[in-house]
Image (spheres, rainbow, N blue to C red):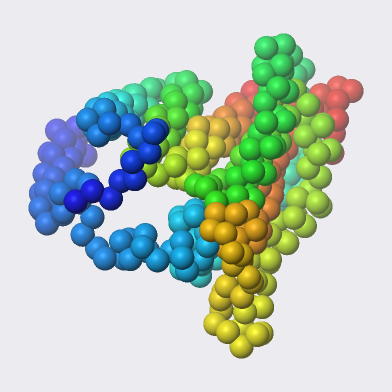
Amino acid sequence: MTPRVRRWVFLAGMAGLAAFYLWGLHGLPGFGRYPGPYGDVINRIAVSQTNATGVVSAVNFEYRGFDTLGEEFILFAAATGVATVLRRLRGEREGSAEDEAAGRDLPPTSDAVRQVALILTGPALVIGWYLASHAQTSPSGGFQGGVVLATAFMLIYLAGQFLAFERFSPADVTDAVEAVGAGGFAAIGLAGVAMGLSFLTNFLGLGTIPGAVSSSGTIALISFFVGMEVAAAFVLIVSEMLDQALLLRAAGPGGRSR
Amino acid sequence: MTLAVVTPYTVPAGLMDVLQAVLLVLVALGATAVVLTRAPVRQVIVLSVYGLLLALLFLVFQAPDVSLSELAVGAIVLPLLLLLGLAKVRSREK
């Protein structure tokens, strides 16, 4: 295909896309005008029904908890997939002496990066824990908290402590935490079924004060399990990728080798 | 019709409109910058800045929970994974 023909094909495609796009924009409601009833209904009833002032969490873990369960297992499957694929690659490369010879010394981490990473690790842990355990009171939740918790472990790596990163997040513990997090969500749903209620029914006491940490029943509990799952999944994925990227560096003469 | 809750911390509606418009423009510029950056490592850094801009955009559009997720995933975790991938590719090229 000559550049000339290619350009015409591109322009024709763009024209078609633009036409469909404008057509699609035509019937949309105006900017900032919400037409549907569901958001307004939820805004009115969510706090009194669930005692959770974090209404987004109430929606995520209660009204559409089943969707969130599916989303959580997407991440679970992704982490499992990464671990599976990268493990096989590691075995393949172990037989290659040529690759190991390519190992080189680690470039030194600058003191500035090391300091900042060490200073931020503690706050990241606290904020992550806070977010994961306060879904019911404020805009946060297990997913956000879990990701922030995972970044705390990445900061340990940034501080130049790859071996410490592995010590703080050994694969067996990470795997177990991830499994408990993912399974805990499903178990809460099934516990409702075992009591003769529907799947994911909020069977715990809602507390008496809306917005108290102890309020909202299973919403807070599910958020906490999601936080475990997400933190472990991200740590697992990043440590698998780190293993891949750093293996050659670490396997130089006198270095770590597997 | 107004559904907004007015508190001592409420930003005036006019200022909020300006913030939203500015951030929409910045996100459009940031996305263009990511596409136009050719060197992979530099592109990852620009992508990280773009993730930060998106987090701010979600914040001024009153989605603080989405903003928190985007901040951690878009500005930190995704660039880190891409950098690790690049490091791996480069070590194999040598």
Q: Residue furthest top?
A: A111
Give me the residue at 73% from left, 23% from top. Answer: A118
Task: Report x, y in % for residue B27.
Answer: 32, 30
Q: Quadrant of the C terminus of chain B?
A: top right
| Occupied quadrant, residue A195 | bottom right
Task: Report x, y in % for residue A13.
Answer: 16, 46
Q: Is residue A151 left or right of residue A68?
A: right
Task: Report x, y in % for residue B42.
Answer: 47, 20
Nearer the observer, B17 or B31: B17
Nearer the observer, A165 or A42: A42
| Occupied quadrant, residue B38 | top left
Give me the residue at 85% from left, 30% from top. Answer: A256
Q: Residue furthest right?
A: A254
Give me the residue at 67% from left, 12% from top. Answer: A112
Residue A151 visible from this viewpoint = yes
Is B27 above or below relative to A77? above
Q: Residue furthest bottom?
A: A196
Task: Report x, y in % for residue A227.
Answer: 64, 52
